[in-house]
Image (cartoon, rainbow, N blue to C red):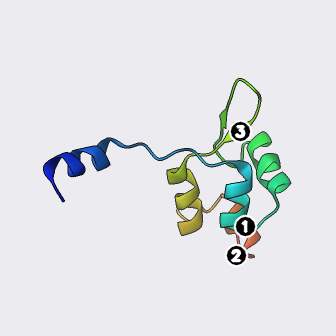
Amino acid sequence: MTLSDTLLSMTQVTSPLTAAEVAERLGVERQTVNDWARDGKIPAITLPSGRKRFRVADIEAIERGDNVNSPHYLTLGRPE
């Protein structure tokens, strides 16, 4: 990897995920993801169109169980 390739990879920002993409990663329905976003259970970015997008880092944290209050943690049936 060249220096310019390394610098380019360091500056690239991962595109936010759609509700459908988050739903697929977490194994839930798209509407569930939208409900969680509406209820403040999952961080979301609201676009001017009203659609939601989700940061990859936030979803990865939920997948890892970093936030025990996350909906994914609760849906796995773990005790609160």
Residue 12, image quadrant: top left
In the image, what residue type sits under mark 1?
Leu
Give the labeled residue for mark 3: 52
Q: Residue at x 71, y 23 (%)?
A: 48
Give the labeled residue for mark 1: 74
Is residue 28 placed above or below 41 in the rendered structure?
Answer: below
In the rendered image, residue 5, in percent from the top left (x then y), is placed at: 23, 50
Give the labeled residue for mark 2: 78
In the rendered image, residue 58, in percent from the top left (x then y), is placed at: 55, 51
Local crowd at mark 1 within 10 Å, few (<14), some, or many (≥20)? few
In the image, what residue type sits under mark 2?
Arg
Quadrant (top left/top right/bottom left/bottom right) for the C terminus: bottom right
Q: Residue at x 71, y 74 (%)?
A: 79
In 3D space, how far apart are the residues under numbered discs 1 and 2 (Cα atoms)?
Answer: 6 Å
Local crowd at mark 3 within 10 Å, few (<14), some, or many (≥20)? some
Residue 67 in sight in this render: no
In 3D space, how far apart are the residues under numbered discs 3 and 1 (Cα atoms)?
Answer: 22 Å
Mark 3 / mark 1, whichever is N-terminal: 3
In the rendered image, residue 71, in percent from the top left (x then y), is placed at: 72, 59
Which residue is the extreme one toward the top? 48
Mark 2 / mark 3, whichever is N-terminal: 3
Q: Are marks 1 and 2 in contact (CB under 8 Å)?
A: yes
In front of the other: label 2 or label 3?
Answer: 3
Residue 25 in sight in this render: yes
